[in-house]
Image (tube, rainbow, N blue to C red):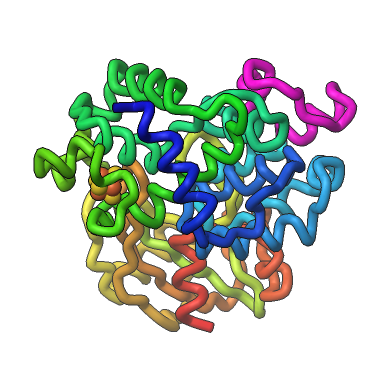
Amino acid sequence: MSNLFTPALLHWHHTENRREMPWKGEKDPYKIWLSEVILQQTRVEQGMAYYERFIQNYPTLQSLAAAPDQAVFKLWEGLGYYSRCRNLLATARYLVAHNHGSFPRNYSELLLLKGIGPYTAAAIASFAFNEPHAVVDGNVFRVLSRYLGMDTPIDSTAGKKLFTEQAQLMLDKKAPGIYNQAIMDFGATVCKPATPLCTQCVLQSSCKAFATGMVNQLPVKEKTLTRRLRWFTYFILECKGKVFVHQRRGRDIWQDLFEFYLVESEKMEPWSDAAIHTWLEQQLGATKATIVYRSELFTQALTHQQIGGRFIHIQLAQIPPSLRKNQWVSPVERARLAFPKFITQYLKEKS
Ligand code: SF4
């Protein structure tokens, strides 16, 4: 069955695939890497704008390596998964310092770089260097599991191994870049997650899931995600036109990003006016304060956590002694800092 798959897929790619993307056909490993890292956490439509901005600001690996951390974080703002942004910078700087500013030309050496896993290594190796490595991402899992009727969970160790082997078997070894592009586009536009276009599909006559009525049951996943719930109350402390900001450190979410004064709790706190004034006095020693605004509830779902919370804007007559050594910024300075999406969604709504 598998030998019908590759020619039919490639035929579809050459005759029917109309998917346009700015990095399509790209041979520059830097641009391929950038697009793949950006696309790992976002929809293509949103990712395109980020990609264009990155290329405009940092057209080469060298320019990215030389960029200040905060400027790159700012450009990344809204994409989430900041560890990927940090890895991007670390790898750019490593390659400039230790590999003459260029990417290694093969899959196994690419895999050794920070933040580059099997998927990205296969994409760079096949698109830029024509190395025969099949990409295995969500699209590929879905297309193969349906076409071959494979119900091994795609998130199990056995599943990952099995699907990677199958993907490699299906690969057109002479044109791996074209094949990889074709299967990703096919998964994104034809064999889609919820509404696959089976009636127009060129693989339909040999598709196992279609023949057995299993299209909507495949692919199978083993784990259903449980998310930890966290409640954040952000106090926007303002004094003489400047607001308190703090850079997050440590191994928690949003590392290195900026935030306002955070009070985290296990459940949602009601924060009555009296409770806010007591807290300001007892916690910060602020006696002269006005509550300017209390926001509605905001939420954000991260991979393993669900964040809920609100923003409370406080006008202070003086900076409390306990916060004098902290950073207070003007609106212009604040606009240059990178904040997590949870905060930028609030700032956007207020602007
Ligand atoms: Fe996917 Fe349907 Fe085509 Fe099978 S027939 S490969 S399920 S789109």
Left or right: where does residue 96 sit relative to residue 2?
right
**Magenta residue span:** 90-114
x, y (%) of residue 96?
Answer: 85, 31
- Using the rendered image of the protein, determine whether residue 265 is visible from the camera's viewpoint: no
Asked whether 330 or 8 is in front, the reply is 8
User: Quadrant of residue 151 in the image?
Assistant: top left
x, y (%) of residue 252?
Answer: 46, 38
Q: Is residue 113 above or below residue 19?
A: above
Q: Residue furthest right?
A: 100
x, y (%) of residue 229?
Answer: 26, 47
Asked whether 345 or 20 is in front, the reply is 20
Question: What residue is rendered at 24% in x and 43% in y?
Answer: 205
Question: What residue is rendered at 54% in x and 51% in y?
Answer: 14
Left or right: where does residue 319 sit relative to residue 260?
right
Q: Residue furthest left?
A: 213
Q: Is residue 224 above or below residue 260?
A: above
Asked whether 250 or 281 is in front, the reply is 250
- Using the rendered image of the protein, determine whether residue 128 is visible from the camera's viewpoint: yes
x, y (%) of residue 297?
Answer: 30, 70
The mark tally for this picture is: 0
Question: What residue is rendered at 58% in x and 44% in y?
Answer: 36
User: Quadrant of residue 37 in the image?
Assistant: top right
Quick one: quadrant of the C terminus? bottom right
Residue 166 magenta: no
